[in-house]
Image: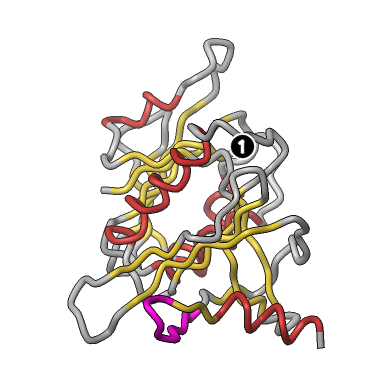
Amino acid sequence: MKRIILLLILCLALSCGKEKTIQLPEIDHSEITEIHDVSAAYLFYDQTQKDSVELNRKNLISTTNWLVNVDKRLTLKQVIPLIKFLQEKKANSSHKNENAKNYFTCHDLSRNNLGFIEFTTTNYYYEKPEMFFSDISNIEYFGNIHSINFESNQEVSILLGYSADINIKTNRLNLEKEIKKLDSVIGRIVLNFNKNLKFQEYITYKSLLLNIDLNQLSFSNNEFIY
């Protein structure tokens, strides 16, 4: 019963006296399945209005873990500005809890229950960085900087940091294999997402990347939306 109630709370919200439903993005498996001390925000999709998105954040408490429930049909162009707005509101709050984190809520298909993807330290930028070397935020880091571009036509390309002439074309099914080929040398990977990607596509890619076991490579906290 507790699980059913939680699902209803997260998937339904009241706005202007009308009940609205969010279609949560689906993932195959999530390592994070339970979070305590939470408050929630909702990004609604309105199929009757072109490019319509509505944020409901009335019940957010800055000192809690935030569950951000985003309708999977929204595009990154619609979602990311509001995500950045929420991040800034929490960061600038006069009441802070350094241990409180931010999560996207998902439907974990493997358990038919809720799963969560953390984005507390993710920094979003509205550009595609030239040569992707601007990601080097630590002067002690000297590894290769690779970039992965996720296009709206489901094409994925990997630009190798040690050779600007090598651009590997691939897709979601083969992405892990291509990344593994690069994992023998220390490096960092910068993720770049086309702004027209649906939020479901974004979460699908993020879930896939989070489940890759890497030894020498790491993913940058900076993500670029172009």
Name the residue nearer the viewer: 172 or 41.
41
Amino acid type at mark 1: Leu
Q: Residue at x 72, y 80 (%)?
A: 110
Q: Secondary structure at mark 1?
A: strand
Q: Residue at x 32, y 66 (%)?
A: 75
- Is residue 201 positioned above or below 86 on the image? below
Q: Is residue 126 magenta?
A: no
Q: Position of residue 5 (x, y in %)?
A: 72, 84
Q: Position of residue 128 (x, y in %)?
A: 27, 40
Q: Residue at x 64, y 75 (%)?
A: 28
- Magenta-colored span: 15-23
In which quadrant will I find the N terminus?
A: bottom right
Q: Position of residue 157 (x, y in %)?
A: 36, 53
Name the residue nearer the viewer: 58 or 203.
58
Within 10 Å of disc 1 (Cα), the crowding (few <14, some 14-19, many 20+) is many
**Res 208 → quadrant:** bottom right
Q: Which residue is mark 1?
A: 217
Q: Residue at x 56, y 76 (%)?
A: 26
Q: Is residue 20 magenta?
A: yes
- Is residue 32 positioned above or below 8 on the image? above
